[in-house]
Image: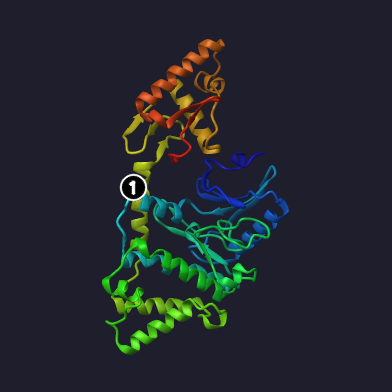
């Protein structure tokens, strides 16, 4: 049994490191990928316990803990379709405009709530980055990685986390995470988001250390808050997430900013829809239509053979990006039950491939020595 036998439409959200994270039609699946299976199993147990204990609308609960063949997994009840990391990369590559300040500050409010709920159960996250934040198609944010940071971990005995994940110095040295270490990592993460935010002029000056526009007392308070947020010694940092959120809310009030989580979710939903339309190949689950990135939908409803071939190619793309389907397999998919000699069947496949390319798949439909495949570098969605 494989993971694909347990879950429909596995779409990778992260595909490297000690764990793989997938979107799976209403669930997020975290699967062990490190060769040390016993270590993966223990870490997944920790993830399951943590996510089961935390009570927050932004932290997905455990749906299942199981095994598919040699692969152990945790399934979370979460309909996320993408990560903040993926959206930020796309936003930078396509030069999307920065997010309005008030809407963008909705994210710290959401994450702060999730962390407060975790700390209330004596659960810390240890490291944090843009891969820890997932989004549903409607922009609803989710936070994962409690128990063990499955999106930042490199495996047993690896203290370092991947680029883009933040952690306190003592955690990087192998010490157990604490609330103050979480707060250090979160503040670094929030600072890393600032290039994507349309900051007010006063905020830009303050972040650059220019507090001339503030009163002397306000400037001193700002400096002291900055020191405590980024202090190397845990004892000099803020000790509770509520303290940090009060600091943030104080800044926002001074700057005339109202954090708006609902507006943030709406903008994320719009971003997901735009990204999907211009960069994602969408294929109907029954292959009755497809839509290439930036193009109109193409109807294949009355073309059974083309539907069969496309369905086989799309299924292969979802299950194993980069894996080609052999011509013989495509013959069976397009003309099931028919007895065709090798040359006749292959000729039908070649015609079907050429037709699908002409209808709009173009260079998305690639040829390899073993057969044909859909471009593994272009995101795919089944609708």
Q: Residues within 10 Å of mark 1 (few under 14, many from 20)?
A: few
Q: Position of residue 159 (x, y in %)?
A: 63, 63
- On the image, numbered disc 1 is attached to which residue? 274
Above or below for 217 versus 173: below
Q: Residue at x 39, y 21 (%)?
A: 355
Find residue 141 and report its horizontal and vertical position in percent.
Answer: 44, 59
Image color mode = rainbow
The residue at the point 43 percent across, 79 percent down is 226
The reply to whether residue 248 is visible in this rendering is yes
- In the rendered image, which quarter is residue 301 located in? top left
Q: Quadrant of residue 48?
A: bottom right
Position of 335 with respect to 198 (left or right) is right
* Tag 1 secondary structure: helix
Image position of 325 (left or right of 207):
right
In the displayed structure, 290 sits above or below 123; it is above
Q: Quadrant of the N terminus?
A: top right
- Nearer the observer, 172 or 280: 172
Front-most of residues 241 and 301: 241
* Rendered residue at 64%/60% (across/down): 158
Q: What residue is at 44 percent from the left and 29 percent from the top? A: 365
Q: Position of residue 341 (x, y in %)?
A: 56, 10
Q: Position of residue 38 (x, y in %)?
A: 73, 53
Front residue of 101/304: it is 101
Q: Quadrant of the C terminus?
A: top left
Q: Is residue 303 visible?
A: no
């Amino acid at each position: 049994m494989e993971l694909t036998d347990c879950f429909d439409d596995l779409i990778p959200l992260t595909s490297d490191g000690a764990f793989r994270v997938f979107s799976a039609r209403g669930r997020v699946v975290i699967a062990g990928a490190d060769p040390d299976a016993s270590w993966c199993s223990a870490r997944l147990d920790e993830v399951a316990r943590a996510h089961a204990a935390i009570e927050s609308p932004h932290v997905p609960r455990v749906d299942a803990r199981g095994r598919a063949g040699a692969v152990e997994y945790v399934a979370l009840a979460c309909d996320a379709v993408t990560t903040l990391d993926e959206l930020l990369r796309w936003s930078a590559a396509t030069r999307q405009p920065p997010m309005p300040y008030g809407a963008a500050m909705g994210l710290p409010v959401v994450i702060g709530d999730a962390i407060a709920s975790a700390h209330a159960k004596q659960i810390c996250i240890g490291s944090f980055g843009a891969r820890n934040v997932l989004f549903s198609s409607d922009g609803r944010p989710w936070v994962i990685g409690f128990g063990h940071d499955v999106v930042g971990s490199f495996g047993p005995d690896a203290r370092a986390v991947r680029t883009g994940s933040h952690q306190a110095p003592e955690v990087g040295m192998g010490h157990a995470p604490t609330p103050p270490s979480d707060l250090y990592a979160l503040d670094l993460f929030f600072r890393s988001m600032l290039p994507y935010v349309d900051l007010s002029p006063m905020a830009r000056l303050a972040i650059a250390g220019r507090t001339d526009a503030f009163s002397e007392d306000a400037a001193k308070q700002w400096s002291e808050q900055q020191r405590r947020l980024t202090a190397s010694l845990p004892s000099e940092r803020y000790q509770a997430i509520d303290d940090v959120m009060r600091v943030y809310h104080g800044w926002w009030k001074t700057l005339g900013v109202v954090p708006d989580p609902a507006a943030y979710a709406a903008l994320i939903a719009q971003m997901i829809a735009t990204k999907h339309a211009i960069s994602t190949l969408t294929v109907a689950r029954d292959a009755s239509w497809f839509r290439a990135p930036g193009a109109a939908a193409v109807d294949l409803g009355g073309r059974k053979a083309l539907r069969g071939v496309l369905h086989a190619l799309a299924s292969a793309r979802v299950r194993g990006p980069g894996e080609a389907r052999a011509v013989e397999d495509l013959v069976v998919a397009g003309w099931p039950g028919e007895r065709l000699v090798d040359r006749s069947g292959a000729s039908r496949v070649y015609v079907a491939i050429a037709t699908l390319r002409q209808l709009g798949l173009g260079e998305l439909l690639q040829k390899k020595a073993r057969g044909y495949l859909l471009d593994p570098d272009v995101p795919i969605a089944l609708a």
